[in-house]
Amino acid sequence: MKILSIAAMLIVIIVTILFTSPTIDVVSNAVLAQNTSNSASSLTKLTDGGSITVKLEPSPNPIKSNEQTQLKVSFFKPNTEEIQPHIDYDMIINESTTNKTIFQASNQTGQPGIPVHTAESIVTIPFTFPAEGEYTIKIPVYGILFNPIAPESVTFSTHVE
C-alpha cells in the first residue's frame, strides 16, 4: 500500500510540473518565448496534411543579413486563429540555391532529429541569416497533443536583403 501511495504522489508531482511550467521553451542558447505582437508581415499556411495552420512572422521585416531576426511561429487549429497547444515540431532553414541546411532547431537541443515540443504553441526563434539571398524555412509537425502524427509540413520562401 505504501508503494502505491508513493507512486501516486510521484504522478501528481510530474503532472504538476508538466502543466505548471512557464511558457518559455529553450533551444540551446536561443530562448523560444511567447510573443503576442501582431505583424502585418506574417505568412500563414496549412500543413500539407491539413492538420495545423502555421503562421510565420519574421521581425524585423524585411529580413537583413548579418542582423538577428526573430522568427515567431504560431500553431493554430486548421483554418482558424485558435491556438493548438502541445505541438512537436522542428524548424529547418535552407539556402534556396544550394538547398544546404544552415539551421535546424532540433540540432540546437543536442538531440538532432528529435522534435522540439511547445506547450503554448507560440515560439520565437532568434536567427541570423549569414548572407543576402533566397531561403526556405520548413516547419515539419510530428505530434499534436502528445499524439504522434504522420509528419506534415509547411515551407515558406523568404528573401534576405
Image: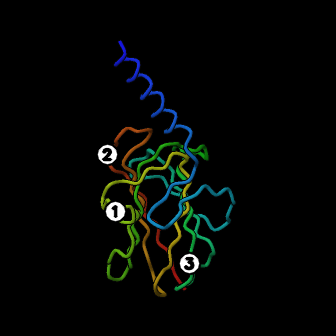
Mark 1: secondary structure: loop
State the residue position of label 1: 110
- The one of 22 and 76 positioned closer to us in this rendering: 22
Split into 4 quadrants, where in the image is the N terminus? top left
Label 1 environment density (alpha carbons within 10 Å; few <14, some 14–19, many ≥20): few
Q: Position of residue 63 (x, y in %)?
A: 57, 79
Query: Is 59 placed left or right of 121 in the picture?
Result: right
Residue 117, above or below 16 = below
Residue type beneath disc 2? Ala
Badge nearest the viewer, 2 or 1: 1
Residue type beneath disc 3? Gln
Q: Position of residue 28 (x, y in %)?
A: 44, 65
User: Which quadrant of the structure image shows residue 97?
Assistant: bottom left
State the separation of the CA atoms marked 2 and 1. 23 Å
State the residue position of label 2: 150
Query: Is 72 placed left or right of 109 in the picture?
Result: right
- Mark 2 or mark 1: whose residue is earlier in sequence: 1
